[in-house]
């Protein structure tokens, strides 16, 4: 029994680890780096067993498990899932079961894009000292706090007059004196000379970069399989509930269901 796990974030890795414990042949296919969205996080507080931990620290633990359990990781972006075969940009791979754990991608604002526009904190260049962050949810404030802790100067622009972020993140941001401009939508931007000129109804501002965090949507390959079992787990299964603890629970539950399938086949 060959299981292909598409995506190397918390959900995919937790599923792979448990399958390995039961002796199931499993491979993770990851297009980028291990960790998924959590690599961006300033701090992970929603997984009690590990306490407060940085996103990079969390990823280090995931990598440790991959190494400890000798889980094969193939770097490729999987584009389609067919019966007993998945197809990536590099090549095709055979499998008996596919687990889609591809997470989410950012919602985009094409009109505000340019060479100094980013959607993931980890993609900010090292030379960025001032950054405009567009969004009022958990990710936007986490990015702002992350920037402040990295000795950068963030300013948060929020379209509405109310933040959607959890109160604890709001408190952290206020404690650090991060400017939050409520009800100040970005009308347009100009980008030149490695600077971003941000214009709102209230005025204009100059930054080194613009980081957009207005939400995320599910990201998954095209699924054509009808005869092969395909599972969806983690953020891709429920993009409105993006919690590391839920993702890990999804991975464990999925692995146990696959183990049951394997045991039935071996009877």
Image (tube, rainbow, N blue to C red):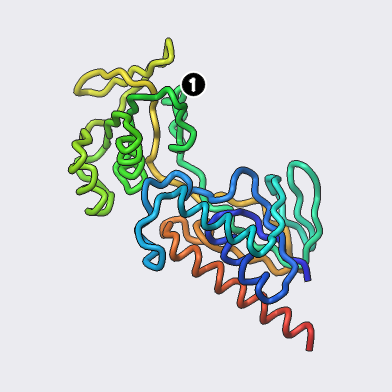
Residue situated furthest top in the rendering: 193
The residue drawn where x is 72% and y is 64% is: 26
The residue drawn where x is 23% and y is 43% is: 173
Q: Tell me which corner region of the image, top left, top right, bottom left or bottom right, holds residue 129.
A: top left
Height in image: 150 above or below 243?
above
Q: Nearer the viewer, residue 21 or 159?
A: 21
Q: Tell me which corner region of the image, top left, top right, bottom left or bottom right, holds residue 230.
A: bottom right
The residue drawn where x is 39% and y is 54% is: 53
Horizontal and vertical percent position of residue 176 = 21, 39
Res 180 seen here? no
Q: Quadrant of the C terminus?
A: bottom right
- Left or right: residue 131 compared with residue 92: left
Q: Tell me which corner region of the image, top left, top right, bottom left or bottom right, holds residue 8.
A: bottom right
Mark 1 highlights which residue?
115
Element marked by disc 1: loop
Height in image: 211 above or below 244?
above
- Left or right: residue 255 compared with residue 210: right
Horizontal and vertical percent position of residue 60 = 52, 52
Query: Alpha-carbon neighbours of circle 1 within 10 Å: few (<14), some, or many (≥20)?
Result: few
Horizontal and vertical percent position of residue 159 = 27, 36
Res 57 seen here? yes
Horizontal and vertical percent position of residue 125 = 47, 27
The residue drawn where x is 72% and y is 50% is: 74
- Left or right: residue 13 compared with residue 116: right
Height in image: 241 above or below 78?
below
Q: Quadrant of the N terminus?
A: bottom right
Height in image: 234 above or below 130?
below
């Amino acid at each position: 029994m060959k299981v292909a796990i598409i995506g190397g974030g918390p959900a995919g890795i937790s599923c792979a680890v448990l399958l390995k414990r039961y002796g199931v042949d499993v491979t993770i296919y990851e297009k980028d780096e291990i960790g998924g969205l959590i690599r961006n996080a300033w701090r992970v507080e929603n997984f009690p067993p590990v306490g407060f931990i940085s996103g990079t620290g969390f990823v280090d633990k995931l990598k440790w498990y991959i190494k400890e359990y000798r889980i094969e990781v193939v770097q490729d972006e999987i584009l389609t899932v067919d019966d007993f075969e998945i197809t990536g940009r590099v090549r095709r791979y055979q499998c008996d079961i596919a687990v889609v754990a591809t997470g989410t991608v950012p919602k985009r604002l094409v009109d505000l894009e340019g060479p100094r526009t980013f959607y993931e904190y980890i993609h900010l260049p090292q030379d960025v000292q001032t950054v405009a962050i567009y969004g009022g949810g958990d990710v936007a404030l986490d990015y702002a706090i992350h920037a402040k802790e990295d000795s950068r100067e963030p300013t948060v622009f929020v379209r509405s007059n109310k933040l959607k972020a959890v109160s604890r993140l709001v408190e952290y941001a206020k404690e650090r004196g991060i400017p939050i401009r409520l009800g100040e939508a970005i009308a347009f931007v100009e980008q030149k000379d490695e600077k971003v000129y941000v214009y709102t109804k209230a005025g204009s501002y100059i930054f080194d970069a613009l980081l957009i965090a207005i939400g995320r949507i599910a990201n998954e390959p095209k699924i054509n399989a009808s005869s092969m079992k395909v599972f969806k787990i983690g953020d891709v299964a429920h993009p409105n509930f993006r919690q590391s603890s839920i993702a890990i629970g999804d991975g464990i539950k999925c692995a146990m269901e696959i183990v049951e399938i394997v045991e039935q086949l071996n009877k």
